[in-house]
Image (cartoon, rainbow, N blue to C red):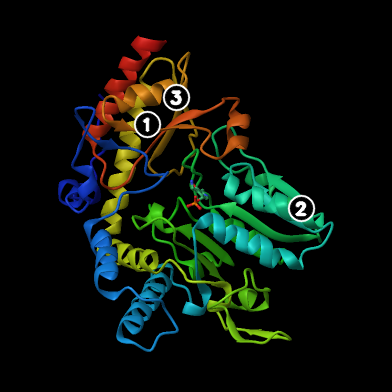
Amino acid sequence: MSAIVKSTSADDWDVSRVRQDFPILDQQVHGHPLAYLDNAATTQKPRTVIEAMDQYYRRDNANVHRGVHALAERATADFEAARESVRRFINARSIREVVFVRGTTEAINLVASSFGQGLHEGDEVILTAMEHHANIVPWQLLRERTGIVLRVLPITPAGELDRDALPALFTTRTRLLAMTHVSNALGTINPVKEVVAVAHEHGVPVLLDGAQALPHMRVDVQALDCDFYAFSGHKLFGPTGVGVLYGRERLLEAMPVYQGGGEMIRTVSFERTTFAGLPHRFEAGTPDIAGAIGLGRAIEYLEGLDWAAAQAYEHRLLEYATDRLKAIPGLRIIGEAADKVALVSFVMDDVHPHDMGTILDHRGLAVRAGHHCAMPVMTFYQVPATSRASMAFYNTVGEIDRLDAALRHARELLA
Ligand code: PMP
């Protein structure tokens, strides 16, 4: 067993206390205590989030923005308060820059459809080789519609961006750089602030996919100076069905509307429609009101945590898990960037990740097996799939020990 690095900050994190906030963690799976190590797919929800949504449906349920009765006013106030919580959390300048969407996927599709309308044949968008499909396919669809060109920044065998290759990707036709802040398949934390600075030197705006970043670190969109930032509520200890597109006001103002319908208009006649102001002009139809309220509550919960301690603790989990897994014969870690979130992707000789996932499940360990919606990453490493243990601040060293033991067991059984 390798030594755990002593860190005052990590020791300040009271994991048993935090676990009590998450009721789902206290259960048995196949006769074992649940060890939930699938946080990159979705995170668990603290009691306060579940209660906020329950309370909304029990007490306040009404449609937002157009009612004059008490419930409608309450629902609207809570919905808009959630928007303000998001603004504060990511330090956007104004709530006009905070658009509620279904999740990261919809946020990126919104930009590809709307910002994309200003792109023409031969215009270029830069992506990276470690993107989730959510940040590849919308651009390919735009390419089919308009004839844009996609350029891809390669990655190194360690799973880091090949930064030296970046400057040469910019041309006079580059219109956007869209990249992930943290890779869901590798765990790599990308140096996004530096990339944004380089892109801006070329006059190119940057969209960051923050789905995997926000659950592990505090993000300040003004400090990063990014132009768009997309994330999902469900990966941030909030509910499914809601997410956020942050957009720099100047860019959002200039973008055509995305979907048409109620909520996003000012006046409608059969001859002509005028649109609402930001951010509502991008929010057609009844939004996920309970979801937004739940997300707002998740943010309040996160704001109450000691982030320095949480991050130090997660880093300790990552180092511990990396050391333990590396010591298992036949196991290879995929993604060894210097800067990573607490996520370990791995393959084991002669064992298919799906079989591995099933064996681990029988011991109460929830990990993910597959291509993680990042097939180009799998192609790069020449593997069909990996197993992925992704941790949050409520996981424990004891759970990693159980993972280690179960992996050794799986190896004996299958390899
Ligand atoms: N980007 C990244 C990096 C992700 O990890 C995910 C979810 N796996 C997404 C985008 C898509 O998020 P959602 O399914 O919540 O829209």
Q: What residue is shown at x 36% (from left), y 57% (from top)?
A: 239
Q: What residue is shown at x 18% (from left), y 42% (from top)?
A: 26
Tell me the amino acid under the disc marked 2.
Arg
Name the secondary structure under disc 1.
helix
Residue designated by label 3: 354
Q: Label 1: few (<14), some or many (≥20) within 10 Å?
A: some
| Front one among 266 and 175 | 266
Circle 3/circle 2 CB separation < 8 Å: no
Left or right of 341? Residue 272 is: right
Find residue 143 and name its label: 2
| Front one among 217 and 87 | 87
Q: Label 2: few (<14), some or many (≥20) within 10 Å?
A: many
Circle 1/circle 3 CB separation < 8 Å: no
Q: Position of residue 83 (x, y in %)?
A: 41, 74
Can the viewer see residue 303?
no
Left or right of 25? Residue 386 is: right
Tell me the amino acid under the disc marked 3.
His
Residue designated by label 1: 322
Q: Is mark 3 within 8 Å of ligand 1?
A: no
